[in-house]
Amino acid sequence: MNLWKKTAFAGMAAAATLGMAACGSNGATSDSENNADGVTTLLMYQVGDKPENFDQLMEIANKRIEEKTNARIDLQYIGWGDWDQKMSTIISSGENYDISFASNYVANAQKGAYADLTELAPKYAKEAYDQLDESYIKGNTIDGKLYAFPVNGNIYAQQVLTFNKQYLDKYDLDISGIESYADAEDVLKKFKEEEPNIAPFAIGQTFNVSGNYDYVIGKDYPFAVKLDGDTTKIINQYEDDEQMENLKLMHKWYNEGLIPTDAATNTTGYPLEGNTWFMREETQGPMDYGDTILSNAAGHELVSRPITKQLKSTGQAQMANFVVANVSKNKEKAVEVLGLLNSDPELLNGLVWGVEGEAWEKIEGQDNKIRLLDGYLPNTRMAAWNTGNNMILYTQESITDDMIKERDENIANAEASPILGFNFKTDNVKTEITNIANVMNRYKASLATGTIDPEENVPKLNEELKTAGWEKVRDEMQKQFDEYRASQE
């Protein structure tokens, strides 16, 4: 982290929270205000659905914020379905606001929509900033400057195969040796024999086959770096033997009934809490404490086996960013409030766990441990992943000191991607990327779910990608990546 503090001069402080919703037409303050009482009101946008007890949560939060910073936040939520369009309108119109969950972070930062926080973050949010893993700073640095406060949460990610433990126990199935897709075949077949009407490998249209890669612009596009190969070269993973072997395996499983017949078109998925599935693929990070969070969400015990490395990537670093608007008249105060949201346990835990005394209570004699109460109900709190610094969240009794120690060791030891911090500028190849996206939309789901034969269709895919301009994009991407690597030496 020290290296990046020197090269970036300082970086995004911590991961702020909550942000808002509707555009200025929802009763949101169109301008941040310095009220008659001398307290600054900051307009803040957040993505998602507003908690049912929002007013109560914010009354408590703003009392704390005002006490500590002489400011309050006017927090407005925008639903996921409207988020991109509304934030694009707000940004392009120059409408005044102060803080927001980042929308198209790299592109909007490059356009000048977000304030440069390189010096502001360590000055006005020092305590929260100092807790960040260096990968957050590196992954959010654009042309040598920082424009975001990343939420300090799952800085690394790992793909896992997750099993419904009740079925493992019922049929005495052993998963201890599973380290890859292929390793899971025997238990999938045994399960299908016992439960022919339950999905062995529950996947749908959005499923992506995982491999030993990191992806420059996401898994949906054919641009990757092979983590155990030449990490200086951008490749098409669909031309790599590992990807082909996995796709062939999916096709085999599909033909054997181990994958649902409607997988390529299924958009509804298989709920975690249901008993309609045996194995699924999930993403886990350090703040999941193994299968703890996943099992809590399911309401019953789940057990997972990792199939990829613990990888710190640009995607993880940018998973939940908060930004200060370049049009804000209160940039320093906005950063100060973000810093408080990410360093003050009383404030953050009251938002993420809900109202103290109603949803949870502290356990006497145990530092930072809590017990959930009957008032801990759905939609009465804010999500941890996009609210604030997970490192200062209280934990339930089930999270042991050993689990916290393992979390911290995993964060320290996780591998950094060779493309961490590389942000591809698409200006010169926008048409080609659109063409490539159209090609991938025709093939990806069917290939990933095993619905079509990869040996027959991957060559067709690669030929169409070439026609769509894959080589032009790759060459531009490789040029920028070479320049990026040279700048890091």
Image (spheres, grey):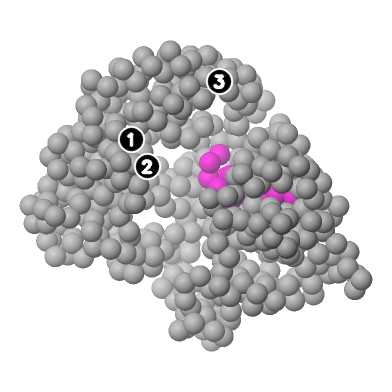
Q: Secondary structure at mark 3?
A: helix
318 drawn magenta: yes
- Label 2: which residue? 206
Magenta range = 314-324
Earlier sequence position, callout 2 versus callout 1: 2
Earlier sequence position, callout 1 versus callout 3: 3
Earlier sequence position, callout 2 versus callout 3: 2
7 drawn magenta: no
- Which labelled disc corresponds to residue 431? 3
**Residue at 77% across, 53% down:** 97
- Which labelled disc corresponds to residue 445? 1
Residue in the foreground of this view, choosing between 15 and 254 = 254
| Vertical placement of residue 432 versus 106, above or below | above
- Can you see residue 252? yes
User: Mark 2 to mark 3: distance in Å?
Assistant: 24 Å
Task: Specify whether 138 is left or right of 285.
Answer: right
State which mark lies toward you, 2 or 3.
Answer: 3
Contact check, label 2 and label 1, Cβ < 8 Å? yes
